[in-house]
Amino acid sequence: MLIDAHAHLTTNDPAYPFDPPGGTVPEQARRDPMTAERLLAEMDAHGLTAAVAVQRAHVFGFDNSYVVDSAARHPSRLAAMCVIDGHAPDAEAVVRHWAERGAAAIRLTAPGGTRHGGPSGTDWFTGPAARRVWHQATNLGLSMCLHLYRWNRDECLRALPAVLRDFPGTPVVLDHIAGVETDRPTPYPGAPGLLALTDLEQVHIKVTTLNHARHLSTGTSPATVVSWLVSHFGAARVLWGSDVTQTPMSYPDMVRLGRASVTGLNPADAAMVLSGTAAHLYRLPAPVPGADPA
């Protein structure tokens, strides 16, 4: 039994209008959306008990209404992760707003998403407004998620410990192995910055199909990479997510790849990566072997 810790929902319901920051909505979101109900059907068909519904900011911007409403309709199956603007002067109030609507986690990322798409630096998670976000998340019992890219990875990893010292009780998840290039030969580019965080128990590492697709394209074994992560961080700090609707792959193939990625682990560690870590972080029911996921 699995928990998908990174499922991007989409809908073409006009009650949830598109608001892409780049001005263009992917055709898949318009014509073939991954609604909450469709995701739940896929989960039931492939042995998943729950998922984290991660805001698809490229489609809906910072309006997280669909993920929080979906989680409210299916509270035992879905948890909502809301994306907000860490530069916004009202960011603190925005965190409270989404928490009141049921958010389990807050996600921050660099504006624009590309090196040339917005301001550089780390203010998006270290600046004064962003620190107020951390403060609210801590007070409200939310976890934090950071999306690093390869181009800003090293700078952000160096800056992270100073923030964590101020918010030691707040769980932090680094998406997509924090941009570490595990699809290249060892020593992986970016690995020193990531491994410098191993002693910070609040740091968790998420590995997704985005990573595994790159692994397959270069002949790298996903199981080797996941075993490497667990050897440094422990299984209780590593979790898996599909990245459905963002990474181009069918959901059944994503699930199969996720299961294959833990074949180098003992059964207890494999279960932790595929479900236990996410259940703990996002207050989801832990899977029971043999139970009906519905």
Image (cartoon, grey):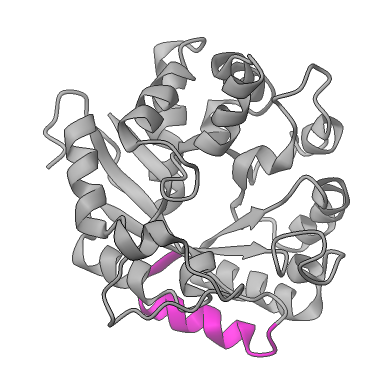
Residue 122 is one of the magenta-drawn residues: no
Residue 91 is one of the magenta-drawn residues: yes
Q: Is residue 202 left or right of residue 14?
A: right
Can residue 283 be spotted in the picture?
A: no
Residue at horizontal 26 percent and vertical 36 percent from the top: 48
Q: Is residue 154 left or right of residue 147?
A: right
Please tell me whether residue 18 is drawn above or below residue 276 in the rendered image.
below
Residue at horizontal 40 percent and vertical 34 percent from the top: 276
Query: How far across and down, in percent of the image, does residue 57 sit?
Result: 52, 67
Classify the position of the C terminus by image quarter: top left
Quadrant of res 257: top left
Please tell me whether residue 91 is drawn above or below residue 162 in the rendered image.
below
Classify the position of the N terminus by image quarter: top left
Please tell me whether residue 213 is drawn above or below residue 130 in the rendered image.
above
Query: How far across and down, in percent of the image, does residue 248 sit?
Result: 46, 41
Query: How far across and down, in percent of the image, does residue 144 sit?
Result: 59, 59
Residue at horizontal 16 percent and vertical 38 percent from the top: 293
Q: Is residue 49 left or right of residue 121?
A: left
Span shown in magenta:
88-104
Please tell me whether residue 181 is drawn above or below residue 137 in the rendered image.
above
